[in-house]
Image (spheres, helix red, strand yellow):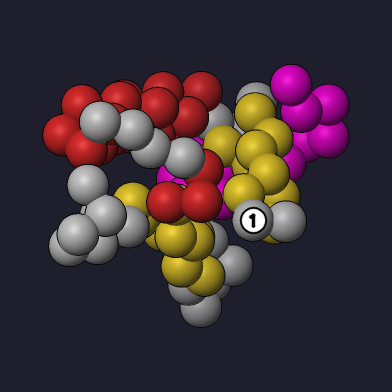
Amino acid sequence: MVDDPQNCMMENCTRHAEIMLEVGGQVIYLCRPHFSQLVSRMEKAAERRGNISPRSLRIEKLNDGKIRVRIARARAGKR
């Protein structure tokens, strides 16, 4: 849980962050709905691939300080 009054870092979101997540050495702050959405997306990717790890997340920084999170596609031959 985030004690600091930080806003969610997701693109176009103005909600207060409740969750702090470290991805690749970078800390990102997420509201509960965006965290749940990310978990759901990772579950779906794991079902398709057979597994998933936080290293599969790609954080794209936008000009306004916000971020966009993408899940990297599995490489051919790595299944």
Q: Is residue 54 above or below residue 24?
A: above
Magenta region, mostly helix, strand or loop? Answer: loop
The front one of 50 and 34 is 50
Q: Quadrant of residue 22?
A: top right
Q: Residues within 10 Å of mark 1 (few under 14, many from 20)?
A: few
Q: Circle 1 is placed at which residue position?
A: 24
Find residue 42 and report its horizontal and vertical position in percent.
34, 33
Residue furthest out toward the front? 77
Look at label 1 and name its amino acid.
Gly
Pinpoint residue 26: horizontal percent, then vertical percent.
Answer: 70, 56
Secondary structure at numbered mark 1: loop
Q: Nearer the viewer, residue 11 or 52?
A: 52
Magenta stretch holds residue 12: yes
Residue occupying the point 65% across, 26% down: 18
Q: Is residue 46 magenta?
A: no
The residue lying at 16 percent from left, 34 percent from top is 48
Is residue 38 visible to us here? yes
Residue stretch in magenta: 1-15
45 and 1: which one is in front? 45
